[in-house]
């Protein structure tokens, strides 16, 4: 079974992917935060992310969010030009600014656009990442025939409605129904926080893979622990996490300006870190206002 890393804007960028693969060993693939068209062009920031030399160590699959075939074509061309052969289609984003423009999870109900997408040749291997719908667990049924007719490497399912964001229980009944109906390789995504849970999904469902997001930021060793069957001690996890944070600091210092911008970026990762870690350590890292203070807090946990 494959273990993929979920796309997460502001977190799973080229720097983090490179460091994650270096410190823990690479996941089967990493999905890029979504690329989108803004003002008639594909946004430069996300293009820089997928063209960074820091991606050399990992298998990266770029992701597109779109509201029309024209937007998707522009992104697909940019992704091809960047040398990629795969593209993941975002049919799950719940953020209102995207949703209200008909992108992300809103696309699940837009069979007119999906019909056109299905008949277009983008010259790339496609996959889909989707939710069941925006407000109802039945919305996906409208595009089911289209999805089943498409040539897709896999379909990742996050079984929550867009109106629920990333909170509340995942709907495993809906997931099971989607697994039975969608004639593609299925990847499960949602709330996996431990290597044991990866194994449970592996044993319970006939799936192609799982995709891990917030749980992996919290416990970046999760995939390696699952692969090796060895549960890491808290000490080992802390010492590796320290390496990750130190390397992120170094990497962001090369590309960003100003202590505070750099520190806020690294602190975004600390927000997700495992609740089992010493609260004093986490507090010191969270409240650091400068790179020096952050580094000093890290030193204490050698
Ligand atoms: C901060 C943040 C940013 C995200 N950005 C993206 C994105 O760019 N594309 C996407 O498909 N999903 C995005 N997601 C959703 C995740 O990929 C994933 O589906 C979600 O976090 C549920 O999985 P998890 O419980 O393992 O975290 C984002 C989630 C978070 C919390």
Image (cartoon, rainbow, N blue to C red):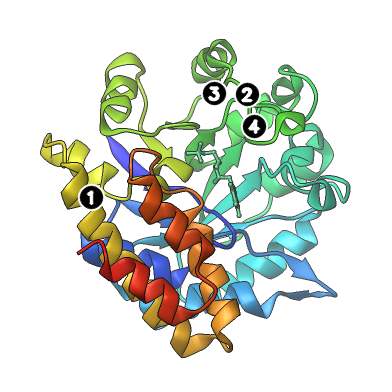
Mark closer to the observer (3, 1):
1
Q: Whole-percent x and y of residue 205?
A: 36, 17
Tag 2, which secondary structure?
Answer: loop
Mark 1 packing: few (<14 Cα in 10 Å), some, or many (20+)? some
Label 3, label 4: how many angstroms apart (C-alpha)? 13 Å
The residue indicated by pointer 4 is 131
Provide residue 224's location: percent of width, then percent of height: 20, 46
Q: Which numbered disc, 2 or 4, marks the residue closer to the eye?
A: 2
Residue 82, above or below 96: below
Dot placed on the residue nearer the N-terminal end, 3 or 4: 4
Left or right position of 282 against 152: left
Question: How many angstroms separate mark 2 from mark 4 (CA)?
Answer: 14 Å
From the viewer's perspective, tell me whether residue 225 is left or right of residue 178: left
Report if the CB atoms under discs 3 and 1 are less than 8 Å apart.
no
Where does label 1 land, which residue? 237
Q: Do the residues labelled 3 and 2 touch (CB within 8 Å)?
A: no
Residue at 36% across / 75% down in the picture?
295
The residue tagged 2 is: 168
């Amino acid at each position: 079974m494959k273990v993929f890393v979920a796309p997460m804007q502001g977190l799973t960028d080229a720097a983090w992917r490179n460091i994650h693969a270096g410190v823990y060993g690479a996941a089967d693939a990493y999905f890029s935060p979504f690329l989108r068209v803004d003002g008639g062009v594909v946004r430069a920031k996300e293009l820089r992310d997928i063209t960074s030399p820091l991606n050399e160590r990992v298998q990266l699959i770029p992701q597109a969010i779109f509201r029309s075939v024209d937007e998707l074509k522009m992104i697909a061309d940019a992704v091809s030009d960047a040398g990629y052969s795969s593209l993941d289609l975002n049919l799950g984003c719940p953020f209102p600014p995207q949703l209200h423009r008909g992108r992300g999870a809103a696309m699940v109900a837009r069979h007119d656009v999906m019909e056109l997408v299905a008949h277009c040749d983008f010259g790339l291997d496609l996959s889909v990442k989707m939710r069941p719908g925006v407000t109802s667990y039945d919305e996906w049924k409208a595009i089911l025939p289209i999805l089943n007719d498409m040539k897709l490497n896999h379909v990742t399912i996050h079984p929550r409605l867009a109106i629920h964001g990333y909170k509340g229980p995942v709907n495993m009944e809906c997931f099971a129904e989607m697994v039975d109906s969608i004639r593609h390789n299925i990847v499960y995504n949602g709330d996996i926080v431990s290597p044991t849970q990866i194994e449970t999904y592996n044993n319970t469902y006939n799936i192609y893979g799982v995709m891990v997001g917030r749980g992996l930021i919290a416990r970046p060793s999760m995939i390696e622990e699952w692969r090796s069957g060895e549960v890491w001690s808290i000490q080992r996890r802390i010492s590796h996490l320290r390496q990750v944070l130190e390397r992120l600091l170094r990497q962001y210092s090369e590309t960003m300006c100003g202590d505070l911008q750099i520190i806020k970026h690294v602190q975004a990762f600390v927000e997700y870190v495992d609740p089992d870690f010493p609260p004093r350590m986490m507090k010191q890292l969270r409240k650091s206002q400068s790179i020096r203070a952050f580094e000093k807090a890290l030193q204490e946990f050698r």
